[in-house]
Image (cartoon, helix red, strand yellow):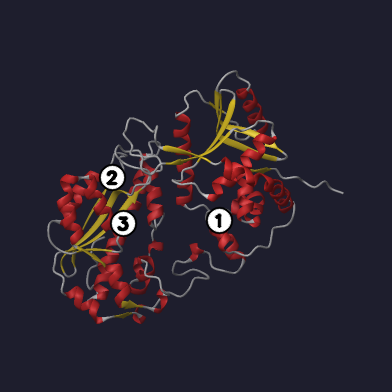
Amino acid sequence: MAAVRRFGLSKSRITYGLQCGKRLWLQVHRPALACYPPETRRRFAAGHDVNDVARALHPDGVLVEWQDDLDRAVRETREALARPGDVAVFEAAFRHKGVFVRADILERRSGRYRMTEVKSATRLKEYHLTDVAVQTWVVEGSGLPLDVLNVAVIDPEFVYPGEGDYRRLLRPIPVADQVRPLLARIPGWVTNFVEILNGPQPAIATGAQCHKPFDCPFLPFCEESEGRRPAEAAGVGGEGAPEAPDPTLGRVDPAAAAYLASLPFPRFYLDFETVQFAVPVWEGTRPYEQLLFQWSCHEERSFGVVEHAEHLDTSGDAPMRAAVEGLLETLGDRGPVFVYTDFEKWRLVELAARYPDLSPALESVTGRLVDLFRLTRAHYAHPALNGSYSLKTVLPTIALDLDHALLDEIQDGLSAQAAFHEAIEPGTSAGRREELRRGLLDYCALDTLALVRLAHHLEHRPTTGKEPPG
């Protein structure tokens, strides 16, 4: 009789199993099926950035590497802890009863041990406690008592003073009282997950668990296995894709046309792209603050006579001030400014607070905004909308040629953020940076051209002749 293979577990694998046994099985047996969108990859990178800051706050720390040699990592951890006196160990490695973990920061101070799990979140979350519980069970099972258990989260009120000073970025939260009651459950988890890994692929249907605590990277595979269309196949055309919506089925309330006809020229159609950093990189900014790095504006001098202006800075320097100054010059002091939802409005409010000298002009622009989302939701109907009025849902019902799926790499705001992050990385090649820059410009310009076409559709004045430049 063949021996049963015993699969090792880790904190990550236990986390996968708690989300869904099928995800755990696929992660181990068929990892190539995982599909990680750009934003997920950026979240992973943010975690690395925060860990780098945490380590820099402990200049006496020792990093245990050996990612591919777990036995060597465990030995190096023992060697680091064998040193006399106080010590801080990063990525300290432990194994207990077939479960391997690495602690972000393990400190010994005056003979007492403190373990800290570093997170890129701004508040304590339930799955953080599970992470710390698994680590505690393994570390203490290896014979090392832990006196203090912390989760370090980002303080959202931190304002980066510059010069690499991140001393107040992280806020430690004691969690021992919440974690220790979970330890008794871990042996049962271990037994269950080892059984899952030694068995066939679990027959688990997709459901709410696919999105908690994070979107499962195997969801497209599972949906396809169930005969459902994966989200990535939602574009027009292609095998299994739904029929393209028929624009003639749309109905516009005449009130929308009357309102739009009352608005003067010039008209401006505006879209912002912003970026967020878990670890602020520009002086005077906060973690996860929405920071303007790009805008597109189609200016309509008279009906159908359209010019395009845009701004994008991929130098890596703080882009907000130059973006605002260029925007104010383009918008001038008169004419309605069309946007879609309140996103641009709140960014203008924040920019006015950041730059008091530009505040009057920015407040004036805010007063000129016209929200096409509200107008569309109130006065436009099409059976293909199915209750959704996102711009990407509305556009194919009025103009199939404006489908974002026709773009290359950058098709939504999240992928635009990921592209900007990559573009400003010092290690990004000049050719790749230009490729990303072109993709960002094309994406943002499509959004504002789409607003032009949407406004024309609602006004019952379809664009004729040469297409406005994009």
**Tags 3 and 1 touching, CB below 8 Å:** no
| Image position, residue 314 (x, y; %) | 31, 43
Which residue matches tag 1? 216
Q: Quadrant of residue 450?
A: bottom left
Task: Mark 2 vs mark 1: give the one in front.
Answer: 1
Going by the numbered disc 1, the residue's amino acid type is Cys
Residue 460 visible, this angle: no
| Among the two numbered marks 2 and 1 on one chain, the one whose residue lies closer to the N terminus | 1
Q: CA distance from mark 3 to mark 1?
A: 29 Å
Residue at the left extreme?
333
Residue 96 or residue 233, whichever sits in front: 96
Number of the label disc, if any, that sits on residue 401: none
Q: Position of residue 248 (x, y in %)?
A: 34, 81
Going 63% across and 23% down the picture, which residue do you hit? 79
Q: CA distance from mark 2 to mark 1?
A: 33 Å
- Circle 2: residue type: Asp
Residue 147 image point, x, y percent: 59, 32
Label ID, residue 444? 3
- In this rendering, the answer to whether 232 lies above or below 254 is above
Residues at marks 2 and 3, CA–CA distance in whole angstroms: 13 Å
Crowd class of label 1 (few under 14; some 14 to 19; many from 20; radius 10 Å)? some
Considering only vertical position in the picture, is 161 above or below 335?
above
> 10 Å neighbourhood of mark 2: few (<14), some, or many (≥20)?
some
Q: Secondary structure at mark 3?
A: helix
At 20% from the left and 73% from the top, the residue drawn is: 260
Instruction: Name above or below for residue 234 compared with residue 84.
Output: below
Question: Does 240 sit above or below residue 187?
Answer: below
Q: Which residue is mark 2?
A: 313
Residue type, numbered disc 3: Cys
